[in-house]
Image: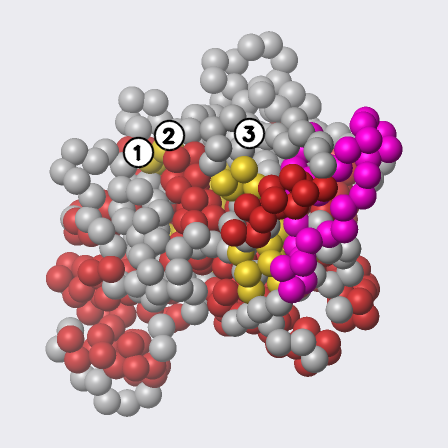
Amino acid sequence: MAGTTRHITIQKDQKFPQLERCTKCCKNFHCPFCMASIFKPSRPDKVKLHMKSHCNKAVVHGDIATYCKQCPQCGMFYRYQEWKDRLHNFNDHIILDIPLCLTLRNLLQVHTSVSRAVEFLQLTTGVEFPPPDTMLDAYLQFEALTDHEYKYSCPTCGDHPPVVIMGVHKQTASPLSENDIEKPPENFKGEVNLEEFWESLSKEMICRGFVANGEHNPFAVPPSYHFWAPWIGKNTRHSDTVLNTEFQKVHTSSEILNMTVTEERLREELFKQKDDVIRTLCIECGVDSTGSRSDLLLRLYKELKSKQTYVKIYSKIRSASGGWGVIMCPCGIVYSLKCNLCAESPQDFADLLLSWHHMPNVIIYDSAQALAKHTNLRAPEKLPFSPFEGCLVEPTQANKELARCGQLKASLPWLDEKTRGTVPHGHPVTGSADHYVLCAHFHEGSTDGDVLRKLTLVPQLADKVNSEISEKLFAQMKKNDYFLDMSLPSTHLFQMRNIIHHYNENKANKLSTRSTKSFGSNLLTEAVSESLTRSTDDVMEDTILTSLMVLSGSA
């Protein structure tokens, strides 16, 4: 409780505060712990007798006693929780001051775990702190009780951005096997109530202060296919019911697999695997496992022509947890966040996009063709990606040759100025009902089907959208892997949403202070300038160091 004045209900050696005669409303003596409406002012002997009942119900820790309070209507005793006094009561024994909680929050923004922060404070102050895991639980309870909106929206792009960038951070994933994931009931259709799920996670964090260490938490949320939801801002999502069809990955047929996970994509995933995984795959597929890494990959590439080997390799790679999928606007604000229980695929992003109230007009994704095919298969009555299955122009051989030669341009004028008139199902910002899936710069033209999905073909987007902005976020988030990967799935999930929320808020505050606020092409110019500014880490460093000095100096 560094840097704060001890509240009157916290007393040393169980001593009562000195009684003083009232000079405001009467001439009697008040109970220092109760309001006058609960215990009427009286003679000193009666007040002292009443105060003994407080002593009997006090929580004592060492030489400190915390006196509880009683509801005047139902008589229930409830915990001391005085945030107005800048204190957070975790479990009646551990009480954090709010400046410490805010410092832990800011330290997480610069990739410093709670355990490292506790170690630093112990070394600096010479005071012994509770165990790091307990401090983490106390901090997460504080965040769960804080009234966060989790807006996940950009002040420049609004709640419905017309252009988004999608990506997945594969390194941040809890080590789960299929046996750790609860199977869905037979009638599960892939729909989850987002608010109920995240409210359950918050209850788990809060309840950790009410159960003894090692005891079962009745509000614990285990990973399951039927109760595991992404986070999408309230104004961006269609409703509280969102899609999560990951359970279908377990039973993906080879025909659907071929349509949604291309051979080129599977080669890319193979190339990212570690040497021991590649060697094991060679053995399981009956391929010679001797030689260099390049030799092994070439042999596996040849075997991908076999459907049986294709599915086996995909299943092996899919068995790893899939990390975090995000949807961002060009300014770098995260709009959607999903923790994949299995390896990421276009199916996960289709779930997110189909849960949005207004699907973006332009989506930038490294597996553009696979995403378009999968999403259109799921909604054949009204194809989400049209015209031309999300390609910029009709996929004729002539157009492909022009694109390869750099002689093709596909203008999207509604990115500059909203389409006049009313277009059925038109986007609220652009007015257009067209939806395209384009490739990021470093994936352009990697397959024959992607040549008409080049970002550089669109004059309004070329050199104006930083398609690597998601990679920049992941490069920062990777610095959190050392503590997130060691946590429980529910802790991992709750903490990640909270970290990204504060990341969004810091970024949004910088955007809000700028003088230029407009839509269309100016929005894209804003995104370019944003990508050139200092990182969130640099901006916050001075504030955090100041907070630490204040804490260590006042402890």
Q: Nearer the viewer, residue 524 or 486?
A: 486
Query: Of the residues shown, which amino acid type is indicated by label 2?
Result: Thr
Query: Of the residues shown, which amino acid type is indicated by label 3?
Result: Pro
| Secondary-structure class at tag 3 | loop
Q: Quadrant of the C terminus?
A: bottom right
118 left or right of 553?
A: left
Residue at the spot x=57%, y=52% of the render? 55
Q: Quadrant of the N terminus?
A: bottom right
Are the residues tagged 1 and 2 within 8 Å (C-beta)?
Answer: yes
531 left or right of 452?
A: right
| Residue 288 spot, x, y in % from top left | 18, 84
The label number, if any, that marks residue 241 in the structure image: 2
**Total marks in image:** 3
Is 20 in the magenta? yes
Main secondary structure found in the magenta portion: loop
Q: CA distance from mark 3 to mark 1?
A: 44 Å
Query: Of the residues shown, which amino acid type is indicated by label 1?
Result: Glu
Q: Which residue is mark 3?
A: 72
Q: CA distance from mark 2 to mark 3?
A: 40 Å
- In this rendering, the answer to whether 71 lies above or below 80 is above
| Residue 316 spot, x, y in % from top left | 24, 66
| Residue 202 spot, x, y in % from top left | 46, 45
Magenta range is 9-36
